[in-house]
Image: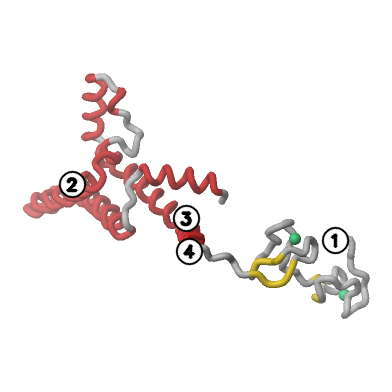
Amino acid sequence: MNTLQFQQQSQTMSQRHLYTGKLLATLAIASVASTLLISGVYVFQSSLGWASGPLAIMGFMIYLLVIATITGVDWRGFLTMNGFLKWKSMTGKQRLIVGCLFVVLNVFVLGIYLVQAYQTYRRYKQLEPLRRQRKIAEQEAELGMIPRTEGNCHRCHQPLQLGAEYCAYCGERVTERPRICPECYATTLPDARWCPACGAQLDTSVLSH
Ligand SMILES: [Zn+2]
Ligand SMILES: [Zn+2]
């Protein structure tokens, strides 16, 4: 991933609320459980008898708890479905209609919102190694830590950074790969010209710079 993508992704993420994995999982399970409970009570009303009332109330309570938690944590993101609903640019009538739909179709709104929250969470997790690396690099730069060097580039003779894959001055590949014989697949030294196992001539054109 390049820097631009990293910045763009960080930006979109910073606009959304970042949930912890635990809270997000709890909210997802609770919303599914409450929806199942309410619809289950509705379907099996007759066979549940007296229990259907308390079960339905329990379902609604769990659902309200989920909505209350989300509203408490990120009311702006939830009410706009993370920027999808642009309340400010709506007329009074439109607001009324969208507001009613928001309430009536709340289960779907909640579902979409939770998926968005999960995407944000996953993207944040994916960028964690890069963020960690950035922090280390910034701290090292702050402390004025200059990377240690070892040996010189065989092409431009500048010092090589310890553990470098490429020369920092000319871009030459530093870590040498062993060669593989195309005839018998024996491995040999990076600058070998002949296979040590079967004597086949190795392609030396790739060695010349
Ligand atoms: Zn070099
Ligand atoms: Zn060979």
> CA–CA distance between discs 4 and 2?
46 Å
- SS at mark 2? helix
Position of 128 relative to 186 (above/below) = above
List the residue tagged with mark 4.
Answer: 143
| Left or right: 107 as drawn, with respect to 125 | left
Work out whether residue 40 can be spotted. Answer: no
> CA–CA distance between discs 3 and 2?
30 Å
- Horizontal and vertical percent position of residue 183: 87, 71
> CA–CA distance between discs 3 and 1?
36 Å
- SS at mark 4? loop
**Sequence order check, earlier mark of 2 and 1:** 2
List the residue tagged with mark 1.
Answer: 206
Q: Depth check: give the residue in front, 57 or 153.
A: 153
> CA–CA distance between discs 4 and 3?
24 Å
Q: Residue at x 65, y 69 (%)?
A: 149
**Residue type at numbered disc 4:** Leu
On residue 68, the disc is: 2
> CA–CA distance between discs 2 and 1?
65 Å
Work out whether residue 16 can be spotted. Answer: yes
The reply to whether callout 4 and callout 2 are in contact (CB within 8 Å) is no
> Farthest residue in the front direction?
144
On residue 26, the disc is: none
**Residue type at numbered disc 2:** Ala
Q: Which of the two marks, 2 or 1, is nearer to us in this view?
A: 1
Q: Residue at x 48, y 46 (%)?
A: 7
Position of 162 relative to 95 (above/below) = below
Q: Which of the two marks, 3 or 2, is nearer to us in this view?
A: 3
Position of 10 relative to 179 (above/below) = above
**Sequence order check, earlier mark of 4 and 3:** 3
